[in-house]
Image: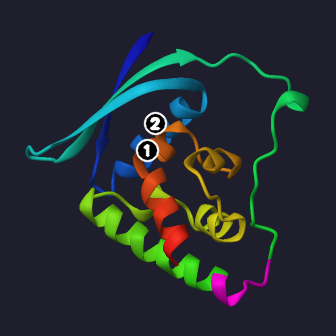
C-alpha cells in the first residue's frame, strides 16, 4: 500500500487546478482508503491523504460498460422528481462539506441515477462516474433518495 498527500486550496485561483491533479491521480490508481480534513489557516484548504495501489491495466474488451444517460433526452415525471431531489441533496451535501456541487456528483451522473434507478449500493458501480469513493461517501443516501421519491 502506498500513501499520497494532496492539498485542495479553496480560492478560485487554485481550486480547479488542485482538483484536476487529484482527479487525474484517482483515475490512475486503485484507492484503498482515504482521509480528509479541513484546515483553517490564512488560506483554508482540504488536506487529503490517499492510501492506494497502482491500477492493473485491463483490456478494453474486458471492461464492463457503465450506464450513462447523457444521450437520453426526454424524462418521465418520476425521473424529473428524482433528478430534482438528487440536485437538492447534492447542493446541501456540497454546502455542508464546503465543496463545489460537481465534487459530489455531476449533472450527468445525477441524470444517470434518475434514469437507471439502482436499488442497491453495489448497483451504483454500473453508473459512469461512480467508484468506491463516491459509493462509500454517498451511496446509502442516494439509494435512500431513490427509494423514497
Residue in view at x 57 percent, y 77 percent: 83
View extreme (right): residue: 61
Tell me residue 121's x, y (percent).
55, 48
Q: Position of residue 117 (x, y in %)?
A: 66, 65
What is the distance, in whole Å, between disc 1 and disc 2 at their CAs? 5 Å
Find residue 91 and report its image quarter: bottom left
- The answer to whether 78 appears left or right of 96 in the picture is right
Please check the rendered image and state whether residue 17 is part of the magenta-colored stretch, yes or no. no
For label 1, the SS is helix
Counting other residues with Cα less than 10 Å from the Cα at mark 2, is it few (<14), some (14-19), or many (20 or more)?
some
Provide the residue span drawn in magenta: 73-78
Question: Is the residue 147 above or below the residue 24 in the image?
Answer: below
Q: Residue furthest top?
A: 1
- Res. 6 image quadrant: top left
Dot label at residue 19: 1
Residue furthest left in the image: 41
Give how far across and how far down residue 112 sits, in percent: 68, 64
Q: Is residue 137 above or below residue 26?
A: below
Position of 55 compared to 87: left or right? right
Which residue is drawn at the image coordinates 64% and 59% (left, top)? 118
The reply to whether discs 1 and 2 touch (Cβ–Cβ < 8 Å) is: yes
> Callout 2: helix, strand or loop?
helix
Q: Is residue 74 magenta?
A: yes
Q: Residues within 10 Å of mark 1 (few under 14, many from 20)?
A: some
Residue 142: x and y, percent?
49, 61
The scheme the figure's colours follow is: rainbow
Location of residue 68 by image quarter: bottom right
Residue positioned 46% across, 36% down in the render: 22
Residue bearing mark 2: 22
The N terminus lies in quadrant: top left
Residue at 65% of width from left, 80% of height from top? 79
Which sits in the foreground, 20 or 86? 86
Amino acid at each position: 500500500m502506498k500513501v499520497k498527500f494532496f492539498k485542495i486550496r479553496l480560492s478560485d485561483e487554485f481550486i480547479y487546478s488542485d482538483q484536476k491533479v487529484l482527479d487525474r491521480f484517482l483515475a490512475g490508481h486503485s484507492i484503498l482508503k482515504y482521509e480528509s480534513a479541513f484546515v483553517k489557516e490564512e488560506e483554508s484548504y482540504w488536506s487529503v491523504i490517499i492510501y492506494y495501489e497502482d491500477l492493473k491495466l485491463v483490456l478494453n474488451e474486458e471492461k464492463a460498460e457503465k450506464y450513462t444517460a447523457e444521450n437520453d433526452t426526454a424524462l418521465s415525471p418520476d425521473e424529473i422528481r428524482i433528478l430534482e431531489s438528487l440536485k437538492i441533496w447534492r447542493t446541501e451535501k456540497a454546502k455542508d462539506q464546503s465543496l463545489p456541487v460537481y465534487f459530489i456528483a455531476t449533472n450527468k451522473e445525477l441524470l444517470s441515477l434518475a434514469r437507471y434507478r439502482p436499488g442497491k449500493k453495489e448497483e451504483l458501480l454500473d453508473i459512469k462516474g461512480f467508484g468506491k469513493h463516491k459509493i462509500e461517501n454517498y451511496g446509502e443516501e442516494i439509494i435512500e433518495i431513490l427509494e423514497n421519491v
